[in-house]
Image (cartoon, helix red, strand yellow):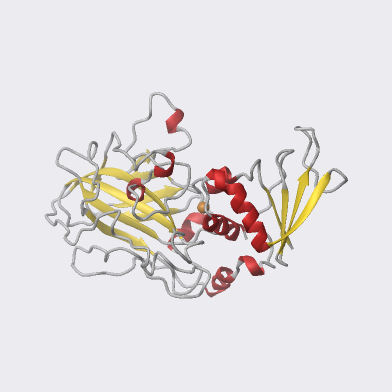
Amino acid sequence: MKLILSAAATIGFTALVSAHGYVDNATIAGTEYKFYQPYQDPYTSPTPDRISRPIQGNGPVEDLTSSDIQCGGYAAGGINGSSPAALHADAAAGDTIPLAWTLWPESHVGPTITYMAKCPDTGCNDYMPGSDAVWFKVQEDGRDGTTNTWGATALMKAGGTVSYTIPECITPGYYLVRHEIIALHSAYSYPGAQFYPGCHQLKVSGSGSTDPSDLVSIPGAYKAADAGITYDAYQATEYTIPGPALFSCSGGNTGSTSSKSASPAASSAAASSIAASSAAPVSSDAPASSATPILSITASPIVNVVTSTSASPTAAAPTSGSDTTEATYTLETFIDFLTEAGKEKGLTRRQIEGLLRSLM
Ligand SMILES: [Cu+2]
């Protein structure tokens, strides 16, 4: 079996590394709120008022020490962290809030985690937590045993949601909610785990009087060496969700909120790797344009790169014939080739390996 992928001019990494999903909307106390749309809001005037803070569409956050890890951002592109949103959603303590993600890619296994932080009494809309320890964890969903069922798995089908519950006992007021997926498909060494965080703002009503203690800072709550940050998702090993213990109104750590049943059949799917990808292809894109090299990755693992030498910029990309040249690479030299090509896109070798792995 072959995996055929078309790579756009200079290898179309822009498309490959763009964020693979974000929270599209949430239904809070019966009202549906559209979240920040990274591919529309920046180009819409006036900018729509949202309850959610801006995120970037350029790719995941991989640096645990970056301000981008808090609510999104694109420091590598000059946008450091996020910024406050204009609105708050009214909610009541005890409410359960479903977050509807866009369709999440199957390769991007990993946990979902949600934190809250109390904003000033004036609201969240000019509040930036910075490096202050203000966050407590209200939701987490990791791996079901050693199966391939993860917190993010529910989002791999259209219409999937992840829910969190506002703790019933917390003091009413304004809260910033930080929700994330950590994609672990290339987390076998650090940097490698991909963080997809986003934040939204609530005005919480209720009669509680608890202010959670043991608050953490973000960045700060995760370390590169944490078992939940550096982790080989292709091995059937139990997963430890990173960060602090889950906050509970009854005190103590209640552990994971996961209640999914184990699915033994799914566990073998996690074991595939790039060096032994004899399974059916999971990705097959049609050739896009004339300059497009056609890459055929076989199980060998040998890579054939067929490059068009046709002068016509509008001709369809040939896959055979006299006007093509063909080169055969081992997987190692192919990754070298991609690393060269990816340099101007600011991609590391590790990211490229992760991308290839995610396509298998
Ligand atoms: Cu990705």
- Where residue 62 appears, x then y in whole percent? 42, 54
- Residue 24 visible in the displayed image: no
- Where residue 99 appears, x then y in whole percent? 39, 49
- Where residue 233 appears, x then y in whole percent? 49, 68
- Quadrant in which the N terminus is drawn: bottom right
Q: Residue at x 79, y 52 (%)?
A: 326
Whether residue 330 is situated above or below residue 208 in the rendered picture: below
* 307 with respect to 230 (left or right): right
- Where residue 18 appears, x then y in whole percent? 52, 45
What is the count of numbered marks?
A: 0
Camera-side residue: 22 or 299?
299
Camera-side residue: 188 or 359?
188
- Quadrant in which the C terminus is drawn: bottom right
Q: Residue at x 34, y 35 (%)?
A: 50
Whether residue 216 is situated above or below residue 205 in the rendered picture: below
Camera-side residue: 233 or 153?
233
Q: Determine the residue located farthest toward the top in the rendered image.
A: 45
* 17 with respect to 335 (left or right): left
Q: Classify residue 332 by image quadrant.
A: bottom right
Whether residue 277 is situated above or below residue 327 in the rendered picture: below
- Residue 330 visible in the displayed image: yes
* 78 with respect to 10 (left or right): left
Q: Determine the residue located farthest toward the right in the rendered image.
A: 322
